Amino acid sequence: MAEATMRIFRGDRESGKHVDYRVPLVPGMVVLDAVHSAQAHQAPDLAVRWNCKAGKCGSCSAEVNGRPRLMCKTRMDDLPLDQPVTVSPLKTFPLIKDLVTDVSWNYKVNKTIPPFQPRPGVEWKMYQRDVDRVQEFRKCIECFLCQDVCHVLRDHGKKDDFGGPRFFVRVAGLEMHPLDGLDRTPLLKKSLGIGFCNITKCCTEVCPEEIHITDNAIIPLKERVVDEFYDPLAKVWRKIFGAKKVPVERRHVDGLQT
Amino acid sequence: MTPPTESKYENHEYDVLIIGAGGAGLRAAIEALAHGARVAVVCKSLLGKAHTVMAEGGLAAAMANVDHADDWRTHFRDTMRGGKLLNNWRMAQLHAQEAPDRVRELEQWGALFDRTASGDILQRAFGGHTYKRLCHVGDRTGLEMIRTLQDRGVQLGFDVFMECTITRLLKDGDRVAGAFGYWRESGRFVTFQAKSIVISTGGIGKCWKITSNSWECTGDGMALAYRAGAELLDMEFVQFHPTGMVWPPGVQGILVTEAVRGEGGILRNKSGERFMEKYDPKRMELSTRDIVARSIYTEVREGRGSPHGGAFLDISQKPAEYVKRKLPSMYHQFKELADVDITKGPMEVGPTCHYVMGGIRVEAESGQSSVAGLFAAGEAAAGLHGANRLGGNSLSDLLVFGRRAGLAAAEHAKKVSAPGLDQMQMDDAEREILEPFERTDGDTPYQIHHDLRETMQHLVGIFRNEEDLNKALVELQKLNERAKRMRVEGSRLYNPGWHLSQDVRNMLLVSEACTHAALARKESRGAHSRLDYPKTEDAWGQKNHVIVNQRGAMTLFEVPRPEMPGDLKQILAEG
């Protein structure tokens, strides 16, 4: 039976190295299957996070041959199998063990975003053409590959000042919801630090849901920030006629244990 | 009872502890919070990754947005008939009556369903539903639902304990007092003291080899409840979804949503024959899941299957753009994992273990189990679906009965004093989960899990008979013995082998319950098909199976179905 070599990172916060495992190939096998095969027969304590193995939950993110991917959607027969398949944990988040990283920071950022709040007295009618663009953002499965690849987080470590593409997508989904009554641009400008993004589109490239993160979420949000904070005419307009939506910066909630 | 001498473990106190963070658990948490309870949600995975996220086709609610003649009575009738009348009629009634409000609520919390031309929530056709009834978002309805509930819960301020596994419920006399578990990351132990506990841990699909279920579906909640003295109901009824992927082997079992058929997909055998004409000429592809699954299985067994042992499912007669818009994940799934373009040609599909209708026996109104303070909702609970669940009724089940269980748990917590934790029970729980580390020989949990899945797949599958089921009980006994001697390597730090050793114990328990009940039911009804008893018998329709732990022995008995009130009988007789 044909085999492949899986070169999987093994280690914890203190130390670690890549270890080779030979695994038998099965037609249609994905990288996650190969990792599970190594786990079941050779390395029972090999830590890997996964849930659905169907590309729907976004749990099995890792870097396969240096590229951030969902392991369940990366087919072995799409990789060059004459050389080892290297599997490493996401670089941007602190390592827990082997392929598992601590992604709790994302859940903390998420909590600072004020959720959907319908405008008072709204009529619950919406049309497909109005929800189409928001539904694109709501396809996000929170795999955090966009966060992993974003250089503001990955190379510059700006986790205190920057929310990352995932949360621009979330805010875009709220801001463009046809019936939402809040204005989250102050939040985008300040604590989520959207200005740090210089639209290199790395996030869009790795998104397994093919969300146009940069073009459809980040750029329109950046435009809103510019309109609101740097456009003197718009400022005067709002002074006279009042803001259309209620501006919010962030909210404080406690309780997520990680 | 021995009082704890010192706080040996990290301990947390709550009014309501919810185990499982899928749709039912999150909806229960939201309701309990709204009624002033202090609420903790414990889940094995990260928040938002529970099996609910995989639900595709939609959420059944008689909103009558598309087919204006629809109402709760028709939904009730469809559910009861789909369940071959074994359902708890009160649950079926509450479910049909309350589902539309639960959907509207989701919309008010930010969910964005697909729309009708007049701006309402769009509804699609599904198997066994008389009218177009499934509210949906393309084929990713579960994701929309779990994200909406998750955001709502975070907003209201529940405490979430992610990647934390509960291994035992603690008792204070006859009532539940809390739970013992460990953090998956560090392996450290943690205890919860709670006045009410809601079990919302989902199903048992991982006991079978070919399944659509995620790794978490290992029957934990049912096993926890059973060990704490609760009753399990109708465990023989396991749904095999007609359409899972069959090729390539690496993707076997992954779900192909019923929405493919809801949107007009046609099933054919290898000769191109539309075989549903033989099995259910009236409803064809939109017959109930038990019938479609058996039909595909029969075609394959009689030599009319597709090359890889399934049937062909074809939606390519619809415009490509329509298919991509209404079934985007199916399009990508087949394109990426099977090299098949579903806008151009058929998919190969076959049955995959999908859902268990049985579970913890609860009161219809409250989700209260037979143990004081212990509630259950969602797939972990039994009753609503009877002998076969209709597609789309699961997501609405989670919302309707998640809400009811959360409410009842919060009310219960207001009435009772804080329970005490018993050190002896905790010591025992600790000893039990550490034991595998001490062994140097014996099987790994992976080996036992592998053999369990083979056993259940081949002996307790779609078609059953006495010989196979007896054989399965013998095999399960052997597996239980091996599990008592299984070994775990490595440290307690994020150790999946160790985690699986806990799951395996639960899977063995629910597999045994399922097999016992399947052996006892000497008829065929809904998802339970006995080759040796192929008929549906009226007498069997009058009773449910209850399984309970009596002095350490798994004991099964029959209970009569409660008499249905006249007005509901009337509704059933119509249409």
Image (spheres, coloured by chain):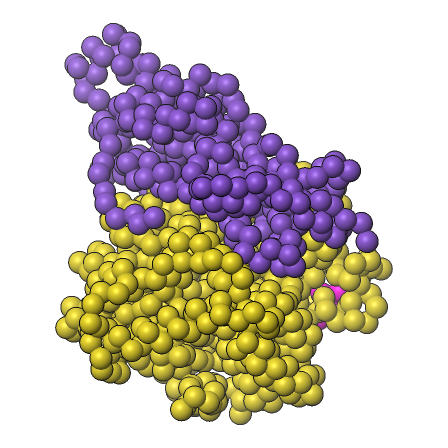
Residue stretch in magenta: B275-279
Q: Is residue B180 left or right of residue B447?
A: left
Colour of chain A in the image? purple
The image shows residue A166, relative to residue B390, as above or below, that is: above
In the foreground, B247 or B219: B219
Q: Is residue A42 magenta?
A: no
The image shows residue B243, relative to residue A177, as above or below, that is: below
Q: Residue at x 75, y 61 (%)?
A: B310
In the foreground, B46 or B423: B423
Q: Residue at x 22, y 22 (%)?
A: A243
| Residue B166 drawn at (x, y percent) | 38, 65
| Residue B71 drawn at (x, y percent) | 41, 62
Answer with the quarter of the image where residue B245 lies.
Answer: bottom right
Q: Is residue A67 left or right of residue B19?
A: right
Asked whether residue B288 appears in the rendered view, the answer is no
- Indicate the quadrant containing the N terminus of chain B: top left, top right, bottom left or bottom right: bottom left
